[in-house]
Image (spheres, rainbow, N blue to C red):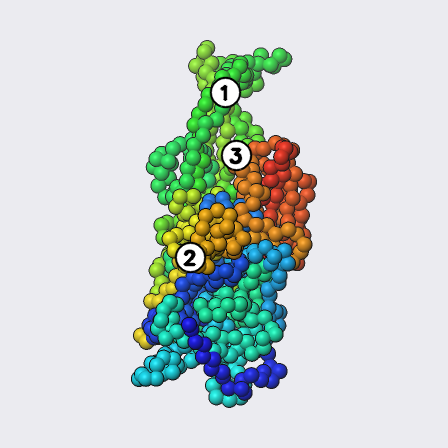
Amino acid sequence: MQRLIKIFICAALLVTGGQQAWGYALLGPIANGGDSWQTGILGYGLAYQDILKYPGGPVFLGDIGAPKNLAEGYRRNDQVLYYAYDQNFSGFFGAQGEAACDQAFAIMNNFFTNHPNGVDGYSPTLSEFPFDSQHFNGIAQGLFLTDLKSVTLHCLVEQMGLAEPERYTWTLRQRTELASPPPCPENVVYVVINRNFGIFDQPLTGPGTGTIYSPYVNNLLYTYGIAEDCNRHPPVWSAITIPFSTDMTQPQYTAVAANDFEGGAQSGLGGLDIGGFYSGLTEDDAAGMRFLLSSNNIVFETPAAGAQLENTNFSTLNLLVTSNLTTLLEFASTNPPGAVQAAFPNVVIDTVSNFFVTVTNPIISTFLTNNPGDPANLPPHLVVVTNGFFLTFPQEFSYTFGNLVILHEHTNTAAKVQTISIGNKPGDPANLPPETNVTTTTTTLKGVISGDYYTLPPGSCGIDIYATLATNNPAGSSTNVVATFTDPNTGNTSTESIITTFTNDVFEYFACTLTTNGPAQYQGVQHIQFVRVSDNNVDPLTQAFFTPITNSYPMVWFNPTNSQLGVRRFQRVITAPDFLFTASDQVAANDFVSTVSRNINFETGQVLPQEAGPGVIDGETVFNFNKVGTPFWNGPFVDTNSFVNGQVSGVNQATAVPSVLWASFDGTTNTPIVYPTGASIQELESQMIISISPTSLPDGTNGVPYVPTPFTATGGTPPYSWSVSGLPSGLALLGGNVVEGTPNGNTNGVYDVTVQLMDSSLPTNIVTMPMTITMHNSP
């Protein structure tokens, strides 16, 4: 039997004095460096646990980190992070489950983009945020449902570097057993510390006050008791603090960063409750992320894994001459990769696909003749006629090039039609030798792309053009003979040709190369953007991207040589999602993880000896949701006499208690969605037979007309009915299937848009596709 020893802090702390108070805890590795005391004996590194016989949970997800002291926290320093869902997740939760998780990312994106300068733009007191953002759905409470969006939101806040603030308002630093007798717990003494921090110093009201360490979370004061196990085990700990509010009339553990902590000793303290859902972040969630990512927080740290510094060499000028785009595109369209690489060795081929086309070829005849009424000595002119057609099926190719920079591009090309014939002009003497006659007209070649380009060498991050030395117009020409006729009487040859020219530029430039960069003192990045990657770009077997994503972003660093701030640009090539959502059946022998398992990657290379931080959170995180279905806890038998067969068994359906049941719900009267649903399965089937195009939407700029984007579909039964929700202000779905308009009044950032198609089949196929639109300010 466990004994609970409650040790209360000084009564002076129980008076708030009318002052608003906050608190946040910093997350880092368990027991690293100077925090080697963070052992399981003191309640650190606890594993997942589900409170048995409590319908629906509550669930403590388990520790992936431990609290860190001030200036030893861990944070992310990449401004754009990418997430994706794999087939295991989509197959169980469907498009509705993906949309629910997208809502959690939308809350995070809104937090970072509400102000142009991100977290630094909020008020000093963070009055924009509530102390408690959890609301309840009565139906979901009665059915013991857990909100998928809210669990995802907690996991994302945790991944930003925040630990459970309420749990660490008071936490054990040391447990010492003195000589016995007396026996445990009478011979045990403890050292209790704070690992929760306020925005401002607490008032000096008594011992242990007047510092940044805070016993408050979301304006609620916490005290604690100590649970002592006397090394009986389980649980793994011998002693642990259990913080609780001094005002039991108020909701406790209200931070989204709270991990439903129960400590294995007491239940019902708070966190995300059954039937509860988060509508956003609380003040202390915002306070913690603002502290970590503020521009005032300069930390010696390493850039994100895989990021390379864009280094421009301003000491050496280079010469650049652009090339003919038409020549490249025409050659590439009809030649395989080997031939393209041989003809254009500086071009990097990313992808290539081939296809066959049907070409109708005219049978052309040419001859020289005079029109009726022409003077007798007028030389005949060339006539081109078509006498039928024949079909060919040539192979063509489609390429994407990885290092091609197009400087000018025109979808239609100006050209000249030139006819060259041999003969005499009117009025020439009869015995005068024939002359070459040239006539020229202008035309436009529709759909023929022209322009100029240059290529970037390997390891390049672009060029910085210093000056334009020349613009050559024309820089060269190309002649394509389309018809030829030889006079059988004279042997003279006449031709008709199309002549195109191209313009190129000559530049002086400074080269930018990518280099590996070591650690430096960097500001917080102030804002982070989460971008969803289309399911179509994720390999279902490896979860890698079919097409890598390149992201370039700035970081502000402190230069110790001149004590000045400067900007460095980094480039990161992302080949796999930073956050991958998957699902699996997590029931194993004597082990049942009924919610979500997750990992976190702490980079500790810059941590000094005897310190535990600071550091960077980096690498891929996998959120693995349990898709066992609708599990129920049952048993044990109350005694040996109740173990019987048949209807009188002491363990039966009536004694079962539901474990975690995934759902999506809100504060409306809408019926909760419980996963998996028949609707979600039907959507998945619909997605297999109906394809929507495009799969992504162009960026938008306030005050600039949006590029009209029509939706089309293949498969199913036309006609289709379209709907779009979540569009930025100024955009609308017009004409039934076209997104257009002029954006206005939108803040910078990513807007989550949901596109839905309904076809005309019975039953109706419904396909829902989440997309995003990134909005920018007017140029």
* Rendering coords of residue 702 (x, y %): 63, 55
Q: How far apart in space, not on screen, are marks 2 and 3 (Cα)?
A: 87 Å
* Rendering coords of residue 740 (x, y %): 65, 46
Q: How far apart in space, not on screen, are marks 1 and 3 (Cα)?
A: 18 Å
Image disc number at residue 448: 3
Residue visible at 38% across and 80% down in the picture: 185
Q: Which element carries disc 2, helix, strand or loop?
A: helix
From the viewer's perspective, is residue 520 above or below residue 402? Answer: below
**Mark closer to the observer (1, 2):** 2
Report the residue marked by disc 2.
Answer: 640
* Residue 67 relative to residue 17: left or right: left
Q: Can residue 291 be seen here?
A: no
* Rendering coords of residue 262 (x, y %): 48, 68
* Rendering coords of residue 620 (x, y %): 41, 56
Tag 1 near tag 2, CB within 8 Å: no
Q: Choose between 279 and 667: the one closer to the eye.
A: 667
Q: Can residue 141 be seen here?
A: yes
Pick out the residue farthest to the front: 641
Of the numbered discs 2 and 3, the one sitting upstream in the chain is 3
Report the residue marked by disc 1.
Answer: 361
